Amino acid sequence: MIPSNEQLFQSVFNYATLPMFVVNTDFIIIAHNKQHKIISNTLDQDVIGVNVSAAFESLTPAEALTLLMDNLMLSKNSKEVVQLPSFQFVSLAPVNDITEHSWRIEIVPVLNHAQEVDYLLTIWHTDHIHAEILPAAQTQLGEELAATGEQLEAGTEQLEAAVEEIEAINDELTQTQEKLNKLSQELEEKENLDDHSDKKQAVESQRDRLKRFLMQAPAGICVLDGPEFVFELINPSFQELFPNRDLLGKTFVAALPEIKGQLMWEILQEVYATGETFQGSEMLIPLANEETGNADERYFNFIYQARFDSAGKIDGILLFVYEVTDMVLVRLEVEENEQRFRLLLNAIPQIAWTNTVEGEINFYNEQWYSYTGMDGEENQRMALRQMMHPDDLKNHIEKFKAILASEDSGHYETRLKDEDGGYKWYLIRMQPIKDDEGVVLLWIGTATDINDLKILQQQKDDFISIASHELKTPVASLKASMQLLDRMKHNSSEKMQSLIGLAGKSVDKVSGLIDSLLDSNQLAQGGIPLNKTLFNLYELIESCAVHVFRDDQSQLIITGDKDLSVHADQERIEQVIINMLTNAVKYAPGSKEININIEKITDTVRVSVTDKGPGIPAEKTPYLFDRYYRVEESRQPGLGLGLYICAEIIAKHEGKIGAESEVGVGSTFWFILPL
C-alpha cells in the first residue's frame, strides 16, 4: 500500500484542473497531467521523453515556441518563477477541429536538497482576466479612496489568484479517492513482482517529484490524521502561517488551542463525520502566531477535504488554506469609504450621481429618485437622458461628452422632468476625481434647481427686450438730430460746440447699450443668424483699431499670419474684436501696448488680445463670459453683456473662447475659429 501522503502528492499533480507538465533540465517532458493531455490531444500519444520544442512544434507559432523555450531557460538559470505574458496554443479537438487559445504559462523551478534545479513545472492559466475598479469617493474623499483603490486592485488580483488555485485543488480532490484506490492496487502488484524493479524505481522517483511539488506549493497544505486530527504532514506554506509554533505530531487542538469552540473546529468535526467537503471563504478566525501570544483577527480561505483509507473509511482530513487578511481589510476599508461617500451624496440637497470615465452612470442619490419617481432597478445608464427635455437632449449629449473629453470640470443648463411630467430648469455641474498622476478615476455630477432663477431671468429679459425696442426709435431720432446739430455747430459759440460734441458721444453710448441689450436678448431666445463670407483677418483687425485707438494713450501691435482668411460673419467677428480691444483699453489704462496675435493651429485660427493691466483674480476668470457678470474690482460702467455676446457669437461659429489672467501681470482674451 502507498502511504496516504504519497497518494496526496500524486493526486495534486495528476488530477489538477489546470493543465501542467514537467520537464527536466534538458527540457525533456517527463510528466504531464490529464488536463494537459486533453488540451494537446495526446491521450493516445505519448510525449514522455520528447523535447518541448519537438512536442509543441506543430501546436504553436514559431515565435510563441521560442518565447516558451527562452523562459524555460530563464527560470532554470535564475531559479525563480517566470510568467509568460501570453502564449498562443492550438488545441486539436477529437473531431479534428483546430481551435486557438491564449494562455498565461507559469514556470516554477523545483529545487533539490542542494538548492539546484531538478525539474521545471509549467502551469497553464486561461488568459481571461477581468477587473473592476470600485468607485472612488467624493472630492474630500478622493485622495483617500484613490490610494485605497490601488491597494484594492493589487489585493483583489492576489485574492482572485488564491481563490482560483484553492478551487482547482478542491476540484481535483473530489476525484482523488477513486484514482488513489486504483493506483494503490497497481503499485501493490508491481511491488510483488521481482522482475519489475525498473518500474518500481520509476514509481519511487515519481513519488519523490510529487512530494517536492507539494512541499513547494504556494497554498498552505496539511494532513490531519485520525479522529484526534494529528498534524501528520505540513508544507512550508502552512508553517509560515504560524512561524513560531511547533505543529507536526501534535493534535489540532493541542497545537492551536484557541481554535476550540470556534466555528472552524465544529466544521472540522462535521467534515470528519460526514465526509462532505467544506469550502470557507474569508472566514474570520482569531489565531496567534506564537503559542503564548494573543490571538489576532485573521481571515482565511480554506478547504476541508475528508481522506479515505483503502476500505473507503474516513481516516483523516486534508486542509488547504490561504490567509487573505490583508485583502479583506483593504476591501472592508473601501466599502466603509464608499458607504461614507454615498451618505454624503444623499445628504446634499442637490440631485447627484457618479459616472465612469466612459460616461456610464452607476449611482444616483436619493434626491434623484424623489424628484423623478424612478426606482433603483430602472436603467441607470439611460435614466438621465430619459428625464431630459426633448429640446435639450442634443445639447446635453454634446456638453456631457465634451466635458468628459476635456477631463476638467464643466457645467451647462437643461430641463429635467419630474415625477408628475413637468419640467424644471437645472444647472448640471460635473467634477472629475483624479489620482496622484492626474488620471480620471470617476466623475461626480450634480443638478441644482435654478427654475425660479430662470423665471426671474425670463421676466428680466422680457422687460429689457420691450424697453430696448421702445427706446431704440426715440434714440435713433435723437441721434439723427445730434448729427444735424454737429454739422451746424461751427455757427455757434465754442461752449455750444463742446456741449454738442458731449451730447453726441452720450447718444452714441446709449445707442450702443441698447444694441447690446437687443443682441443679448436675441441670443438668449435662439441666437442670431450668420451671414458668412471669406475675409482677411489682419485687414479686419486694422479697421477695428481705427475705431478703438483714437488717441496716443495705447499702441496696438499686430503680429502673426497677415495673409490668413476665414469664412465667417465679418460683422459679428468685428463686434468680437472691437469688444476685446475696447476692454483692453478700458480695463488696462496703464498698459502702453496692446498686443493682438493671429496664429494658425492645424485647421483653426486663434486670435488673442493681450494687455499688461492689473489682471483678474483666478477665481473670477471662469465667470467672465456669463451674462451680466462684472468683476467687482472694476469700476468701469457697463452691463456685463459684452463678453457674453462675444461668447455666443463664437459659439455660433462652432469655435471656442477663453481668457487667462494673472494679477499684476496682465490678461489675454482669445477666440478660436475653424478654417
Image (cartoon, rainbow, N blue to C red):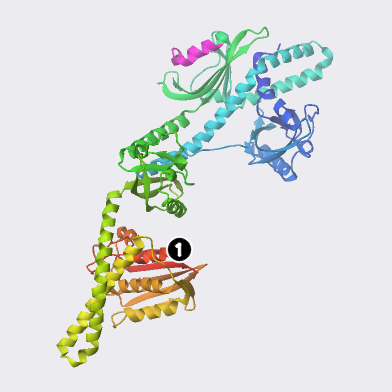
Nearest the viewer among 6 and 267 is 267
- 385 within the magenta span: no
Q: Say what secondary structure mark 1 lies in.
A: loop
Q: Quadrant of the N terminus?
A: top right
Q: Is residue 339 visible?
A: yes
Q: Position of residue 211 (x, y in %)?
A: 66, 22
Residue type indicated by callout 1: Glu
> Where 313 falls versus 399 (above or below)?
above
Which residue, given by chain and number where applicable, does mark 1 sit on?
654
Report the magenta residues as a range. Answer: 253-271
Q: Position of residue 51 (x, y in %)?
A: 78, 35
Nearest the viewer among 476 and 637 is 476
Q: Judge left or right: residue 331 versus residue 628.
A: right
- 256 within the magenta span: yes
Q: Position of residue 119 (x, y in %)?
A: 70, 31
Question: Principal SS element in the magenta part?
Answer: helix
Q: What residue is drawn where x is 28% and y is 52%?
A: 455
Q: Position of residue 174 (x, y in %)?
A: 63, 18
Nearest the viewer among 419 and 343 is 419
